Structures are given as structure tokens and as C-alpha cells.
Image (tube, coloured by chain):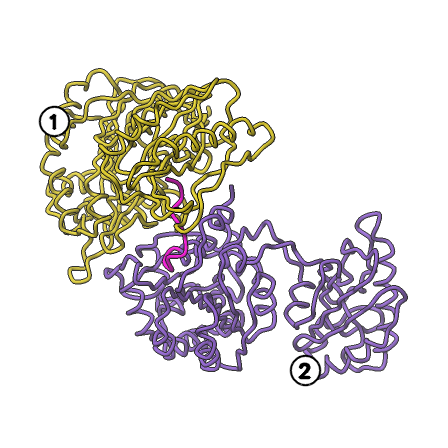
Chain colours: A yellow, B purple
């Protein structure tokens, strides 16, 4: 029996509110001089007090050493075995831009690219502006192929997504992206016997697209990759018998949350806006997922100070969240994004679990990587947080007599 | 998907050097009076400084409570699920002495022993010198059995190995070693229907050996155990796309390392010799496994002070290793061998992981069992070290989008 199946068996409804606040890429590495991480350098009196009075721990996102992408890292926080539910780029993009993906649909990630004399000279078409991509997507929407309903939608800069809808389609088609410049785009190939028609459709679409884009100075072709379908993932709302909502400014995180059964609430532009949205919907849901992107973005830019500043901003507004008296509040990251690395990393992430039923760890200083490993939650896996949240919300029955 | 499969998918080559330094049986128990283990009693300024500035943790070799033999303990350190790849003693000895074992070959561990009036009086023939065993092996090499190509080779002291090559052989044959003195050697029995011919071959060989050795004062018989074939184990060089080398003085550890794809480098007699070998080969490999046997041997002898002295010797030479600036250096044991127990034990083993990307734990005193459990790596499994080494060597791609 998997952990999910065990929790599912035990989950019962209850009149408790659970909040998962994810500061994307929260975990860090110490600055060369201070010896303190971004989180440890930030002035966070509210987080520190909460950490001492409740439980902290250190969560490994997937398995030791493995750096997760955003999708598997969040699936783990929602309680899933992320390796069991690989989510293709096409699907992530489609749900991210808000397309209504159906189980039989196939989604594909698109790059606008530059081609000269039959070979790719720029796989990202000079990172054209999003508005430019939107114009080109409208042009491509004119392509009609019998028996297939094709939706082309711009994502960000040179990125777009295609959703293919119709009878007898297949996701078992190879990428057309050669993954390097100086090479010709690849023809889509069927990766299993039943996929030949889909490969033909894709190749016809690309040929039409090349004809339509021929006069464009930069984005005169498209590269397709990551053909895939929605994963058959059970919803947390069904598994754990709760009403769940997402408050996230970035489309991809909303998309991911909706995939697992959460309803989408307005997020506005700032963390303050997110809290306002949370207050308004407080009585309508049991589980809220709030996503803050700024920490990860600053980490990827290598901006230690800005990452600390985003954390301070959240800390400053924390009293507003606490005023709602959530029964369980978990504050953590989906993974680490140390400014020194300028990228996601494998390092485990500090977790704060605040609840009336949490075992306090008053011996720690505050919320930070060094203290987290010595906190009362100890080292855990991100996937275990869902069970701990349900438990502290008194939403799990006893197992066995 | 297993952890090995996940890491294999993500592994990429990189220009980084990884070093695994195993002090065999490193973990210990506190002395009755001092309250400090062998490692904690040893004067180790270099290890202590390294431990504080980088990460320490406490590794469980296999599963809690299970005492590992050398082979599974090392397989775990190389990243394998040791329970999946049982390796017989015969195979270990054969690869250890450098015999070219083929997949169809059967290997058997041999003890020269003393027999009197049909019963064993010494299972190790008074630990005869290796040269003596070599002479006896040459004598046994005269034994010819039709359809089988038999190689007999001395290992160390009373230990030797036989490799049986030919059509239709089997490893499903029982040991002839009664495992105690005062008992007669056992006849080899077929453990499955197809193995009768092999059992007959073995019994004929032992009879011939007894005839040839009859005049020997000490080693006048042989005891056979651990019939087995090469396990079908994937090589770390293929799995993780690295060039790997072993520097170990003891044949068995070299053999084990070669089984998983490492190339053998000269080890000399001392740790100093091993370091010289490491320096010479530094540019030719990505992953180096150095094995120090003295800690385990002292532990098995119950010699607390000698075990501490071996650790101090390694500590003293550590600056030479650090001068090579390995990107990742892991120092640990394959298991614990507490002097008080005079045997391998199940206790978890301190691990030191030094890397530019390690999370430091300046709050600890040094490298020791008590500090290890409070270090920034926390409690881990030995098997997880391979993923952590690859990660800190920036040799793993991100998982998922």
C-alpha cells in the first residue's frame, strides 16, 4: 500500500483550516562572508517566533541529491510520489496558460525559432516579446487539419503551446526540436504503431506553419517538444475529502494545483493581494495553497539580498495570515534555489509547521536551514507533509484497532 | 522507479573530481571510561576542521539493525540496493585476486584447513603464510577433471579461491565447510536437480586434494564454501557516466570495485602510497575510491588505541589529499566495527561530505559519532551517498519541468 492509499483510507472531513504557504526555492546556502543563508540573513521576527513556538524540520523534496523541477517538487508537497506522475512540458504549459485540457487531448510545447537555409540558427528566435508570440499564434490558428481541433496559445516570450483535440490522436510522437543550432528541424516520428496519423498531422502542421511564417524576420519556424497527455492523477479533494483552493500569481502553479483538484482564486500582484483573497475565501475551503514566486526568481538571478527581501516582505505580512487562526500552517519551499548556485538545487528545505498540536522546539533560534535540521520535526521528505498537515488538522482516523 | 534508475536518468558528465575515502569499520562505541569513541578519541584536527566547515551526517549502511558484511556495505556506498545483488564469497575472492571471471564461471572460496582422524581440528590451518598457500595451490593445480577447466589461486594466508569453467556447471552446490572444529568436512550436495554433476566434480576434486595434501603437517585438507556466479550488476561508470578508479591494498575491495566498473590503480602498502597513486592518476578519472583497512582490523582485534591511531595517521595525511582540491570528498566507513564488540556492527557510521556546495555545520565540535547525528546532512542511508556525491559534483540534471 502506498502512503497516499493509507492516508486516503484514514482521511475524514473536519472543521479545520489548513494553509500551505510555499516560498518557491526557499532553501539556500550561506553567503561567503556571513555564513548565513538568505533565510537566516533576513530579518524575520514573526517567522522566528512561530518557528520556536511550533515545529521545524528539514524536508528532502524528492530523494537525496536530486534537484526537482517545479512540477515534481509541488506534487511532493501535495503528498504525491512525484516519480509516479511525470508531467510533460506540453501539459504544464497548457494548464499554465489556462487551456481547458481534456483527458484525450495531446499538448505540445512550442518554441518560436529562427531558421536559415534549412538549419536552425536560434532555437528561441531572439526571445521575441510575448506580444509578438501572441500575434504569430493568431496567424498559426488559421491552419486547419481535418479531424483535429488545434489550439495555439502564446505562453511567455518565444514559448507557446499547442493542444490537439480529436479522435484517435496519440502522444507517442517524437520531438521536432533538434536541441541545437546548426541542425535541421527533425520530422515528427511515430514512437508506436498507432501514432503514425498523429505524426503526419504534426508534420503537416509544421509545413503549414513554415509557409505562414516564411516572411518573418526572426521567428520563421516552430520547434515542438514534450508531446503528452494529462497524467491520471487522483485529486487531493477526493483523496483527503477536503475543499482546496490555490492562490498563485504564476499560471504554471495555478495549472498544477488545478490538476490535483484545487479551485483557482484571484491572486492579484502582491503577497498582500494574495492574503486579501485568502481572507475573502476563508470560509469556503479547507485547504489553501499560497505560492510566492519571488524567492525563486531572486535565487535564480543570484540576488541574495533580493531573495532575503522577499522573505522579509512575507514575514511582515504574516500577522495578517495568523489573524485568521489557521489550524495548520505550513511554510516551506518546494526546493532550494541558493543564490550562489543561481539555480534550483538538491539541498533540503526548511519547513515550519504551526499548529496547536505541534511539538515546539524552543531551543532553536528561528526559522533557518541550520536550525531546521535540529527542530522537532527532524529530517523529513516533502511528500510526508500532506499527512502531517492532515494529522495536525485532526483529519485522519486512527489506523487499526 | 528505483533510486538508481532515477539517478541514472539524470547523470551527466562534468569536469569535477569525486573522492570516496572509506575507513573500513570506522564507526565505534564509546570506551567504558572516556565516553568517547575511537574516532572521537583520536586527535584529528584536519578531520574536525573539515567537518565543521562542511557537512556531516550519520549513515545507516543497509537497514536499521542490520550488520553488513564488507561486500553489501560497499555496494551501498557505491549507490546500490545491496539486497538486490548478493555476492558470494567465491566471486569476491576470485575478482579480488584478479582472476578473469566470466559470466558462466562458478567461483568458490577455499580455506586450507587441518584435519585429524577425519575431523577438522583447525578451519584455518594455523593461518599459514600466503607463500605457503601459494605452494599448495600450485600442487592442487595438477588435479584434472574432464570437461572442467579448474583454476586454483591463493588469496591471503589460509585463503584461496577456485574458479570452475566449462559447459553445464552449476553454482547450486552446498558448502563442504562444517563451520566448526571437531566435525567432519561435508560432502558437496546438489541444491537443485541440474547440479548433481557439479556436486560430483567438487567431491572428486576434494578427494584428489586430500590425497595430494596428505603429507602436509598443517594444511592437509580444504574446505569449500560460497559457490556462486558473477552478479549481473550494472557498472557505476555506465550508470553515472564517470571514469572510476579504486586504490585499495586488499584484494577483496579491489575486486568489488572492479565488479562495479572501477579500474585498479596501485595502492602500495600505506595510506601515503595510496595518496601518491591518487596524485599520479588525478587527471585520468572522475571518481576515486580509496580504501583503508586498518580501522576495521584494529576494531576486530578489540584494539581501541590502534584503531584511533590508524584514524590519526589518515588525519595527518589529509592535507595532501585536500591539496588536490577534490570537488567532492566523502570520508566515511562502510560499517561500524566497535572495538568493544570486536566485530562488524549495525551502528550507523559518521559521514563527512566536503564540497563547495555543502551546507556547513559550524555548531559541531568535530568529526565523530555524537556530532554526526546533529550535522547538517542529518541521518541518511549509505546508499544515498552516491546521489549526494553526484549532486555536489554538479553531475545530475534537474528532474522534471
**Horizontal relation, residue A356 to residue B390: left or right:** left
Tell me how many marks there are.
Answer: 2
Q: Residue A16: x and y, percent?
A: 25, 21
The secondary structure type at the circle numbered 2 is loop
Quadrant of the image occupied by residue A135: top left
Q: Which residue sits furthest right?
A: B146
Q: Residue A120: x and y, percent?
A: 39, 46
Q: Main secondary structure of the magenta part?
A: loop
Quadrant of the image occupied by residue A359: top left
Q: Residue B230: x and y, percent?
A: 68, 58
Q: Residue at x 21, y 30 (%)?
A: A249
| Residue A387 seen in the figure | no
- On the image, numbered disc 2 is attached to which residue? B129
Kindly check if marks 2 and 1 are in contact, taking CB atoms under 8 A apart as contact. Answer: no
B394 within the magenta span: yes
Quadrant of the image occupied by residue A225: top left
Task: Determine which of the numbered discs, if any, sits on residue B42 in the image.
Answer: none
Question: Does B64 sit above or below residue B245?
Answer: above
Quadrant of the image containing the C terminus of chain B = top left
Q: Which residues are magenta?
A: B391-401
Q: Which residue sits furthest top?
A: A284
| Residue B4 seen in the figure | yes
Task: Determine which of the numbered discs, if any, sits on residue A323 in the image.
Answer: 1
In this rendering, which labeled residue sits more in front, label 2 or label 1?
Answer: 1
Residue density around tag 1, few if under 14, some if 14–19, many if 20 or more, within 10 Å = few
Q: Residue at x 42, y 65 (%)?
A: B18
Q: Residue B97: x and y, percent?
A: 66, 73
Residue density around tag 2, few if under 14, some if 14–19, many if 20 or more, within 10 Å = few
Amino acid at each position: 500500500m502506498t502512503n497516499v492509499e493509507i492516508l486516503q483510507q484514514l482521511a475524514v472531513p473536519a472543521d479545520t483550516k489548513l494553509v500551505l504557504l510555499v516560498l518557491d526555492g526557499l532553501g539556500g546556502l550561506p553567503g561567503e562572508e556571513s555564513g548565513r543563508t538568505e533565510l537566516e540573513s533576513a530579518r524575520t521576527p514573526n517567522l522566528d517566533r512561530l518557528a520556536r513556538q511550533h515545529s521545524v524540520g528539514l524536508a528532502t523534496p524528492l530523494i537525496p541529491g536530486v534537484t526537482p523541477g517545479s512540477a515534481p517538487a509541488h506534487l511532493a508537497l501535495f503528498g504525491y510520489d512525484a516519480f509516479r506522475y511525470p508531467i510533460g512540458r506540453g501539459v504544464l504549459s497548457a494548464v499554465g496558460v489556462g487551456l481547458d485540457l481534456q483527458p484525450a487531448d495531446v499538448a505540445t510545447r512550442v518554441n518560436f525559432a529562427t531558421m536559415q537555409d534549412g538549419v536552425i540558427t536560434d532555437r528561441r528566435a531572439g526571445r521575441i516579446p510575448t506580444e509578438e508570440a501572441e500575434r504569430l499564434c493568431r496567424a498559426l490558428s488559421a491552419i486547419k487539419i481535418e479531424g483535429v481541433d488545434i489550439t495555439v496559445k502564446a505562453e511567455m516570450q518565444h514559448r507557446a503551446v499547442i493542444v490537439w483535440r480529436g479522435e484517435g490522436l496519440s502522444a507517442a510522437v517524437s520531438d521536432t526540436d533538434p536541441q541545437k543550432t546548426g541542425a535541421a528541424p527533425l520530422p515528427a516520428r511515430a514512437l508506436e504503431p498507432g501514432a503514425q496519423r498523429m505524426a503526419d498531422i504534426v508534420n503537416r502542421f509544421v509545413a503549414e506553419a513554415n509557409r505562414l511564417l516564411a516572411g518573418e524576420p526572426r521567428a520563421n519556424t516552430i520547434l515542438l517538444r514534450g508531446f503528452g497527455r494529462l497524467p491520471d492523477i487522483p485529486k487531493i479533494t477526493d483523496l483527503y475529502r477536503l475543499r482546496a483552493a490555490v492562490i498563485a500569481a504564476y499560471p504554471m502553479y495555478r495549472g498544477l494545483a488545478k490538476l490535483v483538484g484545487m479551485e483557482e482564486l484571484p491572486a492579484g500582484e502582491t503577497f498582500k493581494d494574495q492574503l486579501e483573497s485568502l481572507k475573502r475565501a476563508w470560509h469556503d475551503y479547507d485547504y489553501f495553497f499560497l505560492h510566492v514566486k519571488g524567492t525563486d526568481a531572486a535565487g535564480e538571478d543570484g540576488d541574495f539580498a533580493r531573495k532575503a527581501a522577499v522573505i522579509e516582505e512575507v514575514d511582515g505580512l504574516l500577522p495578517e495570515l495568523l489573524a485568521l487562526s489557521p489550524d495548520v500552517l505550513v511554510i516551506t519551499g518546494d526546493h532550494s534555489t541558493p543564490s550562489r548556485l543561481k539555480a534550483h538545487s538538491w539541498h533540503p528545505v526548511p519547513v515550519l509547521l504551526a499548529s496547536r498540536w505541534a511539538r515546539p522546539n524552543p531551543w532553536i533560534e528561528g526559522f533557518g536551514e541550520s536550525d531546521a535540521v535540529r527542530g522537532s520535526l527532524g529530517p523529513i521528505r516533502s511528500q510526508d507533509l500532506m499527512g502531517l498537515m492532515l494529522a495536525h488538522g485532526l483529519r485522519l482516523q486512527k489506523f487499526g484497532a
